[in-house]
Amino acid sequence: MDSLPDAIVQYILSHLNNARDVAACNCVSKRWKESLPYLRSLYFPRNSFDSHSGSDNPDTIVWKMLSTIVCLEELVVYSPFTSAGLALWLLLVHSSLKHLELRMDNITEYQACLDSPSKLDCISAAKNLESLKLWGVLMVNPPKWDVFKNLRSLEIVGARLEDPAFSAALRACPNLTNLVLLGCEGVRSVSIELPYLEHCKLDFYGLGNCSLSLTCPKIEHLEVQGCSWIRVRETTCLRNLSIANNAGRVYMVDFGKLSALEFLSMRGVQWCWDAISKMLEWSSEVKHLYMKVEFTGDLETLLPFPEVDFVEFFNSHPKLQKFDIHGAMFAALCQKNSLKNVEPGFVIPCLEEVVVQVRSPLNAEQKMSTLESLLKYGKNLKTMVIRILQMKSSHSSTDDFFDEICRLRFMNRKIVRIE
């Protein structure tokens, strides 16, 4: 590198971001040291100061490194820090900083949340942020944020939130296009009104009884976990939708016509049948449908799905290309009357791939009939995967059912495989 022009050396070293590497390069030569102020990104791993034995504390060390950089655009800090330290750092780099990621580590420190200014409050100094990602956040009081006009992406991972505090945080970010909340607890009712939001992923931890109201006319991708009541006002742009509730029940959904929807996933232990039937009705244009719901029924009552007519279902979803069917939905399609009214000329026009999960030999004859019908009427079917999981029974019907599935695979070995 001694023979390279200074501009090339600066360009190469500007791609460093690990703080330890930057510190090491700082000691190589005067030429390298003079190139490091042109760094664009700086990253402090979790263990950055584990072996530190100098007189300066970690906050001061970070401040000294930042003070040498001319135009820092990205700062990632996983190592422990104080609110006072963060305030000093952002005072140095706030004008150029576009991307900020912090491991807050105050999710259980209620007293730290009461300190003034708190770590959350300090972030307000970085007014030109375009993306903000926070880990381990305690947000019980509304953060003292001005409006982040340039902020497009907000991600919060592992947080305890109170409804008013979270609402105040969203009001400070009116131009978001990407919102991610993962492993968040404490929120009971969420109302999101963001006119430019396109991608939204919400994962609420706890009893699974949150309510969600979303008014985002440009939303294209939505994933929701842990909500029992979901209302989305604007859906004309929604292409990908995933709803799951691993801990609670899904009681109510309100979407309206999902005319642009291409992918729909419904997962959970229990959904009210009204919610399931409405989602299937609204998603008539869907191309990929994933269903893994075990029971229906209201309140504490766990009930199997009512019968779903095979022909009517596929006539109602003419664009369906991939169908992942698990649990109660497969059993519902396998009822005795499901295939009695097949009209002449009936076909499943676009279906190319089916994934079926089988766990019980009950109603084996109807199940085999449904599998055979998928092969018969799916004229463009290329792949059928049959997953046999936890089929425990000492009854001879289990072996007979497995033999029938093996026969089906042998007769259609180019399409069917067993996992």
Image (spheres, rainbow, N blue to C red):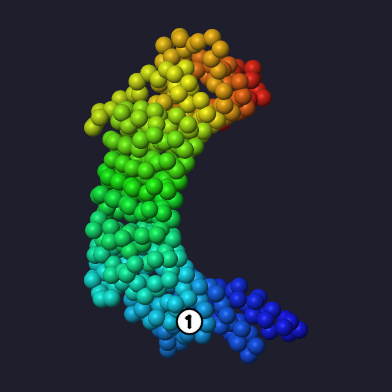
Direction from residue 31 to residue 215 in the image, left or right:
left
Instruction: Please state the horizontal and vertical placement of residue 181, each as a whole percent of the image.
Output: 38, 54
Q: Residue at x 60, y 87 (%)?
A: 34
The answer to which quarter of the image holds residue 119 is bottom left
Q: Residue at x 31, y 60 (%)?
A: 171
222 is higher (above) or lower (below) than 322 = below
Q: Which residue is mark 1?
A: 66
Instruction: Please state the horizontal and vertical placement of residue 57, each as a whole percent of the image.
Output: 40, 84
93 is higher (above) or lower (below) than 109 = below
Q: Looking at the picture, which amino acid does disc 1 mark?
A: Leu
Instruction: Please state the horizontal and vertical placement of residue 6, each as a whole percent of the image.
Output: 68, 84
Number of residues whose C-alpha sits closer than 10 Å to that of mark 1, classed few (under 14), some (14–19) or many (20 or more): many
262 is higher (above) or lower (below) than 157 = above
Residue 41 in view in this figure: yes
The answer to which quarter of the image holds residue 90 is bottom left
144 is higher (above) or lower (below) than 25 = above
Q: Residue at x 61, y 83 (%)?
A: 35
Direction from residue 286 to residue 147 in the image, left or right:
left
Direction from residue 254 to residue 397 in the image, left or right:
right
Which of 182 and 398 lies nearest the eye of the viewer? 182
Q: Residue at x 32, y 37 (%)?
A: 254
Which of 201 and 160 lies nearest the eye of the viewer? 201
